[in-house]
Image (spheres, rainbow, N blue to C red):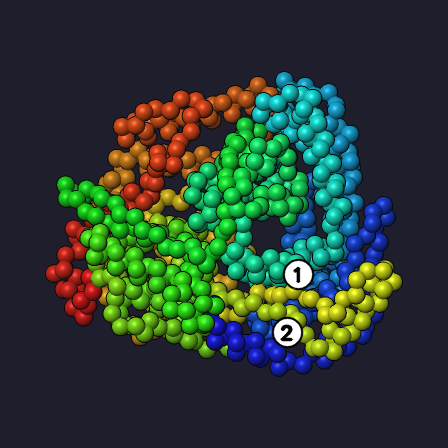
């Protein structure tokens, strides 16, 4: 984050007079349409106020300089409906037709703080949800023939909306059969399966009954802000607190970020340094279907609210939690894997860069290469501002590691591993770059007024002047892209991996209580107190309005090229373990485009282009003979095939056969790799230990750096870049 930019923008925001908001606050809200047969959820005055103010902030201070109109209203409606019912299991075609009346009016409604339309849509969804869960519950005890060659379409996102209740009845009956055959294939008895599924649907009913207007408002605002751009987000008070706790990077649990996808809890990210990361038992995309405390009984959590699931997974440090997971890439019918983790205190500020030393052979020559893994661009700003001379930061930690690698380990080269590093402190990205280049610009920042600030490394000298490589992947984002881009632009090292994420925007966190006129807060407090008095609930003194993370600026490389959308392209390219068409800024419809500004005044360290040609050639020659590379390509190909599948067989024998074949294939591939390394083969049921796991991408990256050591002799580089003495 550019803190000077943030302070300047916040000052401008605080100077705005919210006269229109005062007038709007006095206006009578539009009557809320009622949905019969369900307890309707309605918005409150605070949410109406916040909606108006967010519209004003976005229209006046978002980097896109965008005004809400009918076109944006249409996009918001589509995103909102898709968020509520992504697989088209609840709404009927007639519901969707009814919602069309709001297609071109949400922009005006939001500007006036009128939330009646999206809340009405949610109440329709709530009614449909309860209807279909009730119907599904009646089908659990039905008689099913698992020998029939039927299929169930579990992903109906691109299919038409069901025309009638009868059509959806058929879909839900198939869903029940699908869930029962999944449980049956997993190895439990029929009576237990019926009981499990009954509890699952009862849990769904219980969880939906706990939905409140804050939940609905958050969904509405997500659809609104993400239509503007992917990284402008509003957080209601509860979520704002959680967000800030996450930013504080301190909690007790397993060290994973979780999200719900089609009512199944999924690992969105494994946090570096936590129990899940160190165990290597969990990966992004894995789905958690049940949780047990220590040696206790498992609880089926499919369909639970995410905060309820998280509360089961989190817990005091030192305690154990067991999880049933379906690994990423496996069908939900696959037999769950049971893992056990010991919870720890995850203090994100204390996550440190770490080093290892690898010895490789390159053309018969041994080389020692230091690998520095940087999980995030962290800094303890509180300690730094307090004058603590030993405060934690990425740059300080890496500098110490480099000193050890140079003076004690006597390495020939260093590799910086930024895979899955989603970024962090801009200051740290600049300072870390400064360890490898002398003084000079690192990144440029352009604000909404098109003013460009050049952020420079102002510290003389370098910590490492030898051969250098940087590893990135599709999850390397933001500050990681600034660092990798600068290293590439200066010719200071070789970038290895895949195209990075492409997040080149700057967000500032704004407390909504700080931008609203105090007189409006007093009016809202009086209204809330009056309602609370009638209801007999607690008096509220100052309404909490949450916060907005607003996109207010954009990053550019020293060459003038934006990191936005395109990210950083590696010099040595590997196949991506992550689907490039599903993960990345360029997959976001509302993402800002790539563009360029004027080049900054920088001098490259060296011209590595002639060397890169040889490095690419040698890399490709190795890959043509590599069993690991061949299997990696096969895995990616298999994953792409599965992504195109939207249905699954309901025939028990076929489903079991498919699962067993997949497990046998996986075991055979592991054993083929183990044999190539001289390791004993595994039997069915054996687990691959942490020590036996292979990191082919790292191994090949080290070989590339071995080539770099041999190719980049001092004479060649001095000739290519006579102004440099760094490399």
Image: 287 above or below 101: above
The answer to whether residue 314 is above or below residue 515 is above
Task: Give the residue at mark 1.
Answer: 236
Q: Which residue is mark 2?
A: 514
Distance from label 2 to label 1 (Cα)?
Answer: 15 Å
Q: Which residue lies at the image location 75% right of the left edge and 32% below the top edge?
A: 137
Report the residue at 24% width, 70% height from top: 461
Q: Position of residue 671 (x, y in %)?
A: 35, 26
**239 or 724: which is nearer to us?**
239
Residue found 67% across the figure and 25% down from its top: 193
Question: Which type of secondary structure does the marked residue at label 2 adopt?
Answer: helix
Left or right: 458 in relation to 581: left
Q: Picture coordinates of residue 56 (x, y %)?
A: 65, 72
Residue 172 in sight = no
- Location of residue 690 by image quarter: top left
Say the numbered circle drawn on residue 341: none
The location of residue 150, given as percent across then percent down, is 63, 24
Q: How many marks can you see?
A: 2
């Amino acid at each position: 984050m550019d803190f000077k930019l943030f302070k300047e923008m916040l000052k401008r925001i605080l100077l705005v007079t919210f006269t229109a908001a005062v007038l709007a606050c006095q206006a009578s809200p539009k009557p809320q349409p009622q949905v019969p047969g369900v307890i309707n959820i309605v918005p409150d005055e605070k949410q109406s106020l916040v909606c108006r103010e967010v519209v004003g902030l976005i229209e006046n201070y978002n980097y896109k300089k965008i005004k809400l109109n009918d076109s944006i209203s249409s996009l918001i409606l589509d995103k909102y409906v898709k968020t509520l019912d992504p697989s088209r299991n609840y709404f009927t075609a007639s519901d969707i037709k009814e919602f069309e009346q709001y297609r071109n009016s949400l922009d005006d409604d939001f500007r006036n703080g009128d939330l009646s339309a999206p809340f009405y849509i949610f109440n329709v969804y709530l009614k449909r949800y309860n209807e279909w869960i009730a119907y599904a519950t009646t089908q659990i005890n039905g008689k099913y023939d698992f020998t029939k060659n039927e299929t169930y379409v579990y992903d109906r996102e691109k299919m038409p909306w069901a025309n009638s209740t009868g059509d959806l009845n058929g879909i839900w009956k198939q869903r029940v059969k699908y869930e029962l055959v999944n449980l049956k294939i997993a190895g439990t008895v029929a009576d237990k399966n019926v009981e499990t599924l009954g509890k699952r649907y009862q849990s769904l009913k219980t969880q939906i009954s706990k939905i409140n207007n804050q939940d609905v408002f958050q969904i509405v605002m997500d659809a609104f802000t993400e239509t503007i751009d992917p990284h402008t987000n509003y957080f209601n008070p509860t979520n704002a607190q959680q967000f800030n706790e996450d930013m504080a990077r301190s909690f007790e649990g397993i060290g994973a970020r979780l999200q719900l996808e089609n009512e199944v809890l999924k690992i969105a990210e494994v946090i570096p340094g936590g129990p899940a990361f160190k165990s290597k038992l969990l990966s992004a995309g894995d789905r958690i279907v049940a949780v047990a405390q220590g040696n206790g009984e498992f609880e089926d959590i499919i369909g639970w609210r995410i905060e309820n699931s998280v509360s089961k997974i989190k817990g005091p440090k030192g305690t154990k939690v067991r999880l049933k997971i379906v690994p990423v890439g496996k069908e939900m019918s696959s037999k769950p894997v049971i893992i056990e983790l010991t919870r720890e205190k995850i203090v994100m500020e204390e996550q440190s860069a770490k080093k290892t030393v690898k010895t490789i052979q390159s053309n018969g020559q041994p080389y020692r290469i230091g690998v520095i893994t940087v999980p995030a661009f962290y800094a303890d700003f509180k300690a730094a501002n307090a004058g603590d001379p030993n405060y934690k930061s990425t740059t300080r930690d890496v500098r110490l590691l480099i000193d050890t690698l140079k003076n004690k380990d006597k390495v020939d080269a260093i590799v910086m591993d930024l895979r899955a590093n989603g970024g962090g402190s801009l200051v740290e990205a600049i300072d870390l770059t400064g360890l490898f280049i002398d003084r000079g610009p690192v990144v440029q920042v352009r604000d909404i007024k098109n003013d460009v600030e050049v952020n420079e490394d102002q510290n003389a000298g370098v910590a490492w002047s030898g051969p250098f490589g940087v590893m990135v992947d599709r999850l390397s984002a933001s500050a990681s892209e600034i660092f990798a881009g600068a290293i590439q632009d200066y010719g200071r090292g070789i970038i290895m991996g895949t195209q990075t994420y492409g997040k080149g925007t700057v967000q500032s966190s704004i407390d909504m209580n700080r931008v609203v006129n105090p007189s409006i807060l007093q009016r809202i407090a009086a209204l809330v107190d009056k309602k609370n008095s009638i209801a007999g609930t607690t008096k509220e003194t100052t309404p909490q309005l949450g916060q907005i993370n607003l996109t207010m600026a954009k990053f550019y490389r020293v060459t003038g090229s934006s990191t936005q959308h395109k990210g950083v392209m590696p010099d040595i390219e590997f196949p991506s373990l992550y689907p490039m068409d599903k993960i990345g800024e360029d997959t976001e419809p509302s993402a800002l485009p790539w563009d360029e500004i004027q080049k900054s005044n920088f001098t490259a360290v060296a011209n590595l282009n002639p060397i890169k040609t040889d490095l690419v050639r040698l890399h490709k020659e190795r890959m043509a003979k590599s069993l690991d590379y061949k299997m990696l390509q096969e895995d990616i190909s298999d994953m792409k095939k599965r992504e195109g599948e939207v249905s699954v067989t309901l025939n028990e024998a076929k489903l079991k056969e498919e699962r067993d074949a997949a497990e046998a294939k996986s075991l055979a591939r592991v054993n083929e790799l183990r044999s190539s390394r001289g390791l004993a083969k595994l039997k069915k049921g054996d687990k691959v230990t942490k020590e036996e796991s292979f990191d082919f991408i790292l191994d090949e990256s080290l070989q590339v750096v071995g080539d770099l050591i041999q190719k980049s002799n001092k004479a060649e580089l001095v000739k290519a870049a006579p102004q440099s003495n760094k490399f």
